[in-house]
Each structure stands twice: as structure tokens, then as C-alpha cells.
Amino acid sequence: TVRLRMVKHDGKVSLDATRSDDQASGPINYVTNPNDLRMMLSTQFAGDDLAFVMNEGMVRAIDGTISLRPGSILAPRYPAALGMRAFTSRKVLAATQGIVNQISPGTARASSATFVTYLIRGIDPVTHRFVLVYEGLGVGFGARSFAD
């Protein structure tokens, strides 16, 4: 489970992820850079503002501390399995959307952890070697109060 808590103190916004679950034995651990959390949260605050530009200012918008707990699913210790970390990163994005939904007057985007993966496997007709393609697609998120 990913647990985020946003706190505003002395005019600064901080995120605390220390209550997220311990790192997993499976490949869903996500080595989280604090700037990942800053960018995910600041994009939620921007909402549907068409003047919003994604740049370095997004990182500075969340100007307080970012707290991660070593040994957690968001700050795993080596040698943690990471191969399917995209699933957890989607959960982190959904958690940032959830935070903004709790403080907005019903105008924030809806969160969704929808993530579809597919595998294509077979034998290469030229080399006769096994081929495996793994791909993930994010779908079905971002509904707003005025649109799907």
C-alpha cells in the first residue's frame, strides 16, 4: 500500500510517504526520487489550466520536505526486485490525485490506478529464438467534473 500525507506548515507544502508498506519480495518496488513526488503532486495542482507548462518550476512548487522510509516499497533496499515498478508508480500518481481531491471543491481530476499490460511471445522466424515483448499501457484516467 502506498500512503501519502500532505502537510502545509509555515507556508511550505511537504509530503510524507513513511507509512507506505515495507518493500515487497516481488518486483513492484519503486525507487522514488523525491522530485518524482514533487512533479506528480504539482501536476495535480495545475489541474486543467492550459497555461501550465511542465518544467523545473514543478519541482520547486512543492517546497517542503519529502519523507521516504528506507526499506519501504517507495525506498527499497538493494537488492530489491523492481521489474514491474510501473504498477507502483501509477499507485503513487493515484495517491497524489487523491490528496488533491480531498482538498479541492470537487474540481480535481479523478484518480485511477488503471494500468493494462500485455505479453507477446513467440519464436523469431529468422533466428528461431524465443521472443518476449512486455508492454504497459495507462488507460482510463483523468475524469473531471465537466468531462470524462
Image (cartoon, rainbow, N blue to C red):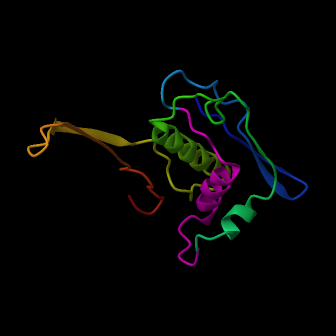
Say whether residue 51 is magenta: yes
Q: Image quadrant for the N terminus?
A: top right
Q: Is residue 122 above or below residue 110?
A: above
Closer to the camera in the image, 68 or 12: 68
Q: Is residue 4 above or below residue 50?
A: above
Q: Image quadrant for the C terminus?
A: bottom left
Residue 23 picture location, percent across and down: 61, 26
Q: Could you tell whether 105 is left or right of 132 in the image?
A: right
On the image, which quarter does residue 57 sit in?
bottom right
Closer to the camera in the image, 15 or 127: 127
Seen at 70% across and 62% down, the residue is 59
Say whether residue 21 is magenta: no
Q: Is residue 106 above or below residue 79?
A: below
> Hey, which residue is sitting farthest bottom in the picture?
51
Residue 24 picture location, percent across and down: 56, 24
Seen at 56% across and 57% down, the residue is 108
Residue 81 picture location, percent across and down: 52, 29
Number of numbered tags placed on the structure image? 0
Seen at 60% across and 34% down, the residue is 2
Task: Report the span colored magenta.
Answer: 29-52
Q: Could you tell whether 124 is left or right of 117 in the image?
A: left
> Hey, which residue is sitting farthest top in the picture?
25
Seen at 55% across and 47% down, the residue is 93
On the image, which quarter does residue 6 sit in?
top right
Closer to the camera in the image, 16 or 101: 16
Q: Is residue 63 above or below residue 53?
A: above
> Hey, which residue is sitting farthest front in the picture?
127
> Hey, which residue is sitting farthest right in the picture?
10
Residue 137 picture location, percent across and down: 34, 48
